[in-house]
Amino acid sequence: MEALEKLENKIVQAVETIELLRMERQELVEEVEALKNEKERLSQQQNEWEAKITSMLEQLTTNTDVTEVS
């Protein structure tokens, strides 16, 4: 009988561990999704800043060329 109780306890412990791991996995999946979204947002923001900087540099180059010609 004692062996059966030990086996039952191990099974219960295994089931609890599996459930905890499933919950942890779900949390990690959600965290990965959130990080992907953040990466996409930051990438878009970087592209916007690069476009603004490029535009400003072009304006500076144009203004410098006009000033040198005058």
Image (cartoon, grey):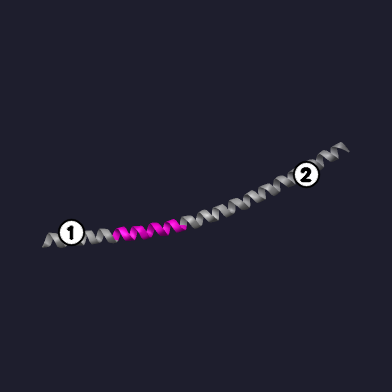
Question: Are there few (<14), some (14-19), or many (20+) residues within 10 Å of tag 2?
Answer: few
Q: Amino acid at mark 1?
A: Thr
Q: Secondary structure at mark 1?
A: helix
Residue shown at the point (70%, 45%) measured from the top left: 17
User: In the displayed image of the protein, which residue is found farthest to the right?
Assistant: 1
Which quarter of the image is occupied by the C terminus?
A: bottom left
Image mark for residue 30: none
- Camera-near label (2 vs 1) is 1
- Please give the residue where the numbered disc 2 appears in the rendered image: 11
Residue 30 percent across, percent down from the top left:
58, 54
Which quadrant of the structure image shows residue 52?
bottom left
Span of residues in magenta: 40-54
5 to 24, vertically: above or below: above
Residue 3 percent across, percent down from the top left:
85, 37
8 with respect to 57 (left or right)? right
- Please give the residue where the numbered disc 1 appears in the rendered image: 64
Residue shown at the point (33%, 61%) measured from the top left: 51
User: In the displayed image of the protein, which residue is found farthest to the top?
Assistant: 2
Residue 5 percent across, percent down from the top left:
84, 40
Q: Within the magenta stretch, is there residue 47?
A: yes
Question: Are there few (<14), some (14-19), or many (20+) residues within 10 Å of tag 1?
Answer: few
- For the residues marked 2 and 1, what is the alpha-carbon distance in whole angstroms? 78 Å
Q: Amino acid at mark 2?
A: Ile
Q: Secondary structure at mark 2?
A: helix
> Which is the main secondary structure of the residues drawn in magenta?
helix
